[in-house]
Image (cartoon, rainbow, N blue to C red):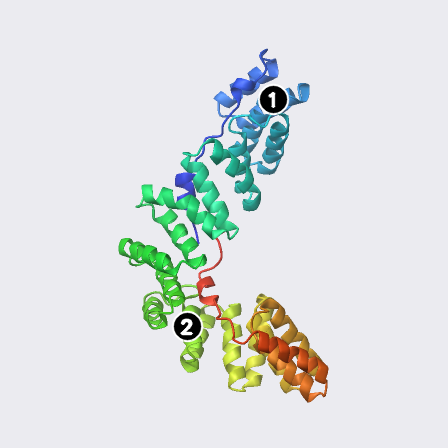
Amino acid sequence: MALNRCMARFLCIAFLIGAATLSAQILPDIAQAQEFDRQGKYAEGAQFWRKATEQNPQDVGALASLGVDLSRTGKYPEAASVYRRALAIDSRLPGIRVNLGLAEFKQGHFKEAIPPLETALQENPGNTQIRVLLGMSSYAVGQYPAAIQYLEPIVAAEPHNAELRLVLAQSCLWANQYERAFSEFKSLLRDNPNSPAVHLLTAEALDGLDREGEAIIELQALVKAAPKEPGAHFALGYVYWKQHQYPEAAAAFKAELANDPDHPQANGYLGDIYVRNRKFDEARPLVRKALKFEPQLRIAHFDLAVLYENEKRYDDAIAEFRKAAKLDPTRADAYYRMARIYQSLGRTKEAQAEYAMVNKLHREKADDLLRKVSGGPPALK
């Protein structure tokens, strides 16, 4: 989900130059670098800051300034390396950690951005921009409770910032805080009632609250208003599928495939419906296509195993059931099917082991795919 406006508003963070730590005796290279910086010629400035650091590798001010100019010219990997060199010399250098965190963030290295930003926030607890960077980084790596912690006070202070509110609401959704997520999405819909993405996320929150009927109504309205919205038809089909309304689910999955023939989940779940109806010839290409585009799609591995079992390719079936079990070891269905195969082959000991797993996992785990329909964390820039 595009967050460019959010980035433009909040990530205009001034790079902090440790000018006070420069050498007491201003060398010609440093003077020239400063002059280029004043003119906005950062690439030229970087050349002279680099020469200054070569003359005095321990000059943390020159290193910090080099990192700033490298960042300003988009050379974030090199900037991050320079900032780390400066930190190794003087860990108390003002602003260096936020600069390092920002350089990692700009590369999409969200996990690496978090530690220096956390330290920077401890040093500057009221800094809103650091909180935004930490919130977005936590969101991007799936640390949703942390994202909520960082973004909540900012959104409370700026309730009209729809972009950040959307990220906060998604974090609540993916942290399984469905009531809170639903409240946020309802508020967002009041401000922007024509947003397909928010309608889709609202339906995900409703599904998480076990209010599937309301989720279906929300999604029906969405696909009517925005029939080309990516994932909307699949989301509707998935809720129908969960409700065992397979004809309605199949129609929705087909509508998604009309928009995106390579949609892995739509292929996989439509294939599953065909498997359930023993339409194996129709199911086979859909299941294989789903696995081509999403090798970790559990339901496709399970259904491929069923297809192999029907063809009496028992070793292949067991291998696919084993993959399905590995992808979600808390569900009993794959273990049960393996136990049945082993029993039919007279492999009693192996059958007993699988039945033991079935008894341990006495009920299936509810699928949570719908909340992932709107996609994972955005590719932040």
Residue 80 lies left or right of residue 177; in this view the side is right
Where disc 2 sits, the SS reads helix
- Tell which of 342 and 39 is nearer to you: 342
Where disc 1 sits, the SS reads helix
Q: Residue at x 60, y 25 (%)?
A: 90
- Residue 222 in picture, x, y percent from top left: 34, 66
Q: Which mark is residue 337?
A: none
- Residue 296 in picture, x, y percent from top left: 59, 66
Say which residue label 2 marks.
239
**Residue 62 in which image quadrant:** top right
Which residue sits furthest left? 190
- Residue 375 in picture, x, y percent from top left: 47, 59
Circle 1 or circle 2, nearest the eye: 2
Residue 191 lies left or right of residue 295; in this view the side is left
- Tell which of 127 and 332 is nearer to you: 332
Where does the N terminus fall, quadrant-wise? bottom left
Say which residue label 1 marks.
48
Residue 118 lies left or right of residue 226; in this view the side is right
